[in-house]
Image: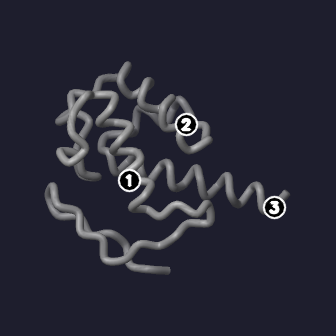
């Protein structure tokens, strides 16, 4: 297993990037999630990092729902409704997407 990302306040430092079974790297997943969130809130992508909180972005529960629909479509995954309440940062979204993509990949290889 490669090195895990180290995060300092507002400045993530990724020591290595591993490719997942689904083919997308953590960095690519983060970039795609950030782009979706930036578009939803009409803000520049370079103002968002994995450590950025939803509170800082003024993301409310309706925004979370809309963003989750976009993320589900972009990654061809299903985000459980109960998971939305636990999402507090952009990094939470990225980690959740990584887990769901990996679970989907392992199900498809097990079939």
Say which of marks 1 and 3 sits in front: 1
Tell me the CA gap for discs 1 and 3.
27 Å
Cβ–Cβ under 8 Å for marks 2 and 1: no
**Residue 95 in the image: above or below residue 70:** below
- Residue pictured at 31% horizontal, 40% vertical: 88
- The residue tagged 2 is 72
The outermost residue toward the top is 62
**Residue 104 in the image: above or below residue 16:** above
Camera-side residue of 59 and 47? 47
Looking at the rendered structure, the secondary structure element under dot 1 is helix
Residue 7, percent from left and from top = 23, 64
- Residue pictured at 44% horizontal, 25% vertical: 65
Cβ–Cβ under 8 Å for marks 3 and 2: no
Looking at the rendered structure, the secondary structure element under dot 2 is helix
Q: Residues within 10 Å of mark 3 (few under 14, many from 20)?
A: few
- Residue pictured at 44% horizontal, 54% vertical: 29
Say which of marks 3 and 2 sits in front: 2
Camera-side residue of 32 and 111? 32
Looking at the rendered structure, the secondary structure element under dot 3 is helix
The outermost residue toward the right is 111
- Residue pictured at 43% horizontal, 24% vertical: 66
- The residue tagged 3 is 110
Q: Disc 2 or 1, which lies upstream in sequence?
A: 1
- The residue tagged 1 is 30
């Amino acid at each position: 297993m490669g090195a895990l990302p180290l995060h300092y306040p507002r400045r993530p430092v990724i020591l290595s990037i591993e490719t997942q079974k689904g083919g997308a790297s953590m960095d690519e997943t983060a970039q795609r999630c950030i782009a979706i969130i930036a578009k939803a809130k009409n803000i520049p992508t370079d103002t968002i990092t994995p450590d950025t909180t939803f509170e800082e972005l003024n993301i409310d529960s309706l925004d979370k729902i809309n963003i989750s629909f976009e993320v589900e479509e972009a990654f061809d995954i299903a985000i459980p409704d109960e998971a939305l309440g636990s999402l507090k940062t952009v990094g939470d979204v990225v980690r959740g997407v990584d887990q769901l993509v990996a679970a989907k990949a392992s199900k498809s290889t097990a079939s």
